[in-house]
């Protein structure tokens, strides 16, 4: 069955290039291409596409608002494309868009084939995601307290305190991370290390976007940066991040693992070496298996390991693989994770 795609872009030339690229894949059919938000809403209602490709920089466009309306009326997977990487905000992700990818360059550029393959692969994968209707957003946590969650599993006694929280995620991760990190209170003193797979060039915007919702400093890591209590650290584009015995973060360029740089596996192995059981390791929504084997190894050492459940994940690849390997202490919904790790850290340091 063909994947029915709607293209939304104000530029005639850009629309034609996208149509040409998408139509080159025998599994994809462009059912319509429109230039503005009102036409997009009408086209979604008329054609009921499997996926929408939307340019984020359209005149008079409000990418957050149009994404929100689509997700509240005709829930459809949305992929954002843009060429203005550094200027991109991630509000469409908060509204329900699944991914942001760079628009492929024109013929003749060295990067063009790889960028084209990335877009086509994203379309194929995201078209299979079963999105649900978004309802008006509930009030978020206030006054530095985690948002309420359902009944959580009991916190098990630990022989040693938790010294670090490490999170790995990919597709669907930006919104999931914002939910989790915004649920950590201001007095949550344990440092948090994050590897997020995201299209190259978006990390600085991503850090700013996360910072708007969180109560704690969020830092894009530099080599030899000292880990300090209370901070959140994100691995930068094109570098593998690891922890060192002296309490610093180390970056290595040009090393790909699982086809990824940064990779969750690389970070988690360093945690095994340096912290052992004094870790909370978490895998959130994401494609593939990055970090799953290493999370299982942390689990064997006695670390507390958490996988996001399938129901709240956009893609259950990474957490699902960790569960399959038997490497997970707890399977929790996204809304439960912040409250559970806050309780776990408090219990481990109260002795």
Image (tube, rainbow, N blue to C red):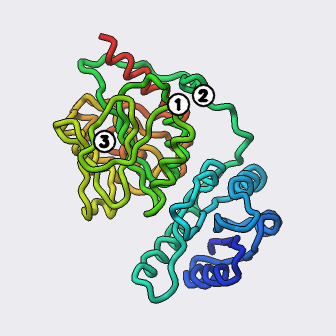
Q: Is residue 321 visible?
A: no
Residue under label 3: 295
Q: Is mark 2 on a helix, strand or loop?
A: loop
Instruction: Pinpoint residue 73: horizontal percent, then vertical percent.
Output: 78, 52
Q: Where is residue 152 in the image (x, y as percent from the top left)?
A: 50, 23
**Circle 3: element type:** helix
Residue at image coords 70%, 70%:
8
Q: Distance between the residues labelled 2 and 3?
A: 29 Å
Q: Which of marks 2 and 3 is nearer the N terminus?
A: 2
- Say whether residue 66 is left or right of residue 311: right
Q: Which mark is residue 141?
A: 2
Image quarter in which the N terminus is found: bottom right
**Residue at 66% from the left image edge and 71% from the top image edge:** 5
What number of labels is visible? Answer: 3
Mark 1 crowdedness (10 Å alpha carbons): few <14, some 14-19, many ≥20: many
Q: In the picture shown, does residue 8 fall above or below 181?
A: below
User: Marks 1 and 2, how far apart in space?
Assistant: 6 Å
Left or right of 39, for residue 311: left
Residue 194's spot in the image, x, y percent?
38, 44
Decide: is 47 above or below 93.
Answer: below
Lower sequence index among marks 1 and 2: 2
Q: Quadrant of residue 345?
A: top left
In terms of image quadrants, where is residue 189?
Answer: top left
Q: Residues within 10 Å of mark 3 (few under 14, many from 20)?
A: many
- Mark 1 lies on residue: 183
User: Outermost residue, top direction?
Assistant: 351
Indicate the quadrant where residue 27 lies.
bottom right
Disc 1 vs disc 2: Cβ atoms closer than 8 Å?
A: yes
Identify the residue at image location x=33%, y=12%.
Answer: 350
Q: Which of 108 and 162 is in front in this view?
A: 108
Quadrant for the C terminus, please: top left
């Amino acid at each position: 069955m063909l994947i029915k795609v709607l293209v939304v872009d104000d530029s005639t030339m850009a629309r034609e290039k996208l149509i040409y690229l998408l139509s080159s894949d025998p599994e994809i059919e462009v059912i319509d291409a429109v230039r503005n938000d009102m036409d997009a809403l009408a086209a979604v209602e008329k054609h009921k596409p499997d996926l929408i490709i939307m340019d984020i920089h359209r005149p008079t466009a409000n990418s957050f608002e149009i994404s929100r309306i689509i997700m509240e009326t005709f829930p459809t997977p949305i992929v954002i494309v843009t060429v203005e990487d550094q200027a991109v905000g991630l509000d469409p992700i908060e509204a329900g868009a699944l991914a942001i990818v760079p628009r492929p360059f024109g013929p003749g550029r060295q990067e063009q084939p790889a960028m084209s393959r990335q877009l086509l692969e994203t379309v194929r994968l995201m078209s299979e995601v079963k999105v649900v209707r978004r309802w008006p957003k509930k009030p978020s946590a206030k006054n530095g307290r985690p948002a309420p969650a359902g009944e959580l599993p009991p916190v098990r006694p630990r022989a040693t305190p938790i010294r670090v929280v490490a999170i790995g995620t990919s597709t669907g991760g930006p919104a999931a991370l914002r939910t989790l990190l915004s649920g950590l209170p201001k007095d949550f003193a344990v440092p948090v290390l994050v590897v997020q797979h995201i299209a190259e060039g978006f990390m600085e915007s991503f850090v700013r976007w996360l910072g708007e919702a969180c109560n704690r400093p969020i830092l894009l890591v530099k080599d030899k940066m000292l880990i300090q209590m209370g901070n959140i650290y994100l691995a930068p584009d094109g570098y593998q991040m690891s922890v060192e015995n002296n309490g610093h973060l180390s970056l290595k360029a040009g090393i790909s693992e699982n086809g990824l740089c940064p990779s969750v596996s690389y970070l988690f192995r360093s945690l095994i070496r340096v912290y052992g059981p004094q870790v909370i390791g978490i895998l959130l929504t994401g494609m593939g298996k990055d970090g799953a084997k290493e999370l299982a190894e942390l689990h064997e050492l006695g670390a507390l390991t958490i996988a996001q459940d399938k129901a709240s994940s956009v893609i259950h690849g990474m957490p699902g693989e960790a569960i399959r390997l038997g490497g997970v202490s707890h399977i929790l919904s996204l809304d439960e994770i912040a409250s559970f790790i806050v309780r776990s850290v408090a219990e481990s340091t109260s002795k």
